[in-house]
Image (spheres, rainbow, N blue to C red):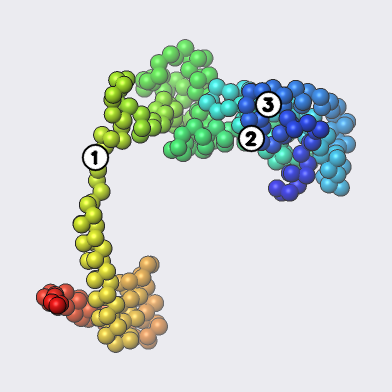
Amino acid sequence: MATEIKTTLPSTKTNTMVPVYGAGDDVSLAKYINEIQKFPVLSAEQEYEYASRWVKNRDNMAAEKLVASHLRLVVSVAYDFKNYGLPVSDLIASGNMGLMQALQKFDPERGFRFSTYAMFWIKAEIYETILNNWSIVKLGSSANQKRVFFNLTRAKRALGIMDNNLSDEQTKQIAEYLDVPETDVSRMATRMSARDVSLNAPLNTDSDSKDILSNMADTKINIEEGLEQLEFKRRGYELLKKHLSELPERDREILKARRLSDPAATLETLSKKYNISRERVRQIEERAFKKLKDAILSESEKPKLINKE
């Protein structure tokens, strides 16, 4: 699909036209919008003709004309979401990808205008972009949560609610207005009001105020403790490997399957494998584990020998 999308992008003779990725700054954005105004709006008959040629013959020229004529629709939709904290150029880029998705899936024989169908995909891509960039903590993406996210401000305005901290009664009113559970409203309202904060941000407005990170407790263990733990783990692994190899083969395999595997093998599975009862498997496991444990503890308690030169 990526190749087909690239081949269907409308091209121009200027380098100011960036159909998929949008424009990088205000000047480029203005030039981009000026460029797309040059593409003619298609009639219903023209839309059907170009869409049919693309669907049946993969006619790239027809696809270019169909897409180019709807670039201004993407810009119009993108500007409707300009107050969500993302550059309009990023929204346009996402909307254009939605337009490409619409082109791949559109069926002209169903009788719908391409613009009507494309609107769904354009908005869907812009919705995802806003949700994914609103916070480094991923917001919910269920249908109800999306409805609350994109309609909370409108609902509050319609109900005359000015408070940022919603009361239980206000939450209930908004939930009924949007036809969603109250929990979705309260959770999304809280997350939308609590934006991400940099750990390098100062604690207060004083010029010499320390940042948040410098006031957080350091929970890392010191180097000596860390090395001691690593040595302990290394020594334990060596003892386990050594004494595990000293067990009889069947005992070793049963112990590994029951105690050292994830997920652990069941007694039933091992009883069939070794043609013994489940109780016998359990007995072998317990015996092998005790033998291994005793051997490891016995050796670990031996005094370490220090070489003196």
Residue 227 x, y percent position in the rendering: 24, 60
Q: Is residue 290 left or right of residue 185?
A: left
The quadrant of the picture occupied by the C terminus is: bottom left
- Mark 1–mark 2 Cα distance, whole angstroms, equals 41 Å
Q: How many marks?
A: 3
**Few, some or many C-alpha atoms within 10 Å of disc 1 (few <14, some 14-19, many ≥20)?**
few
Residue 56 x, y percent position in the rendering: 85, 47
- What residue sits 38% from the left and 67% below the top? 263
- What residue sits 35% from the left and 75% below the top? 257
Residue 253 x, y percent position in the rendering: 34, 81
- Of residue 254 and residue 98, the one placed in the foreground of this image is 98
> Disc 1 or 3, which lies upstream in sequence?
3
- Of residue 170 and residue 104, the one placed in the foreground of this image is 104
- Of residue 197 and residue 23, the one placed in the foreground of this image is 23
Height in image: 116 above or below 269? Answer: above
Q: Is residue 252 left or right of residue 121?
A: left
| Residue for badge 3 | 28
Q: Is residue 61 left or right of residue 152?
A: right
Q: Is residue 201 left or right of residue 223?
A: right
Q: Residue type at mark 3: give it.
A: Ser
The label on residue 10 is: none
| Residue for badge 2 | 94
- Element class at badge 3: helix
Residue 222 x, y percent position in the rendering: 22, 52
Circles 1 and 3: CB atoms closer than 8 Å: no
- What residue sits 49% from the left and 23% below the top? 152
| Residue for badge 1 | 217
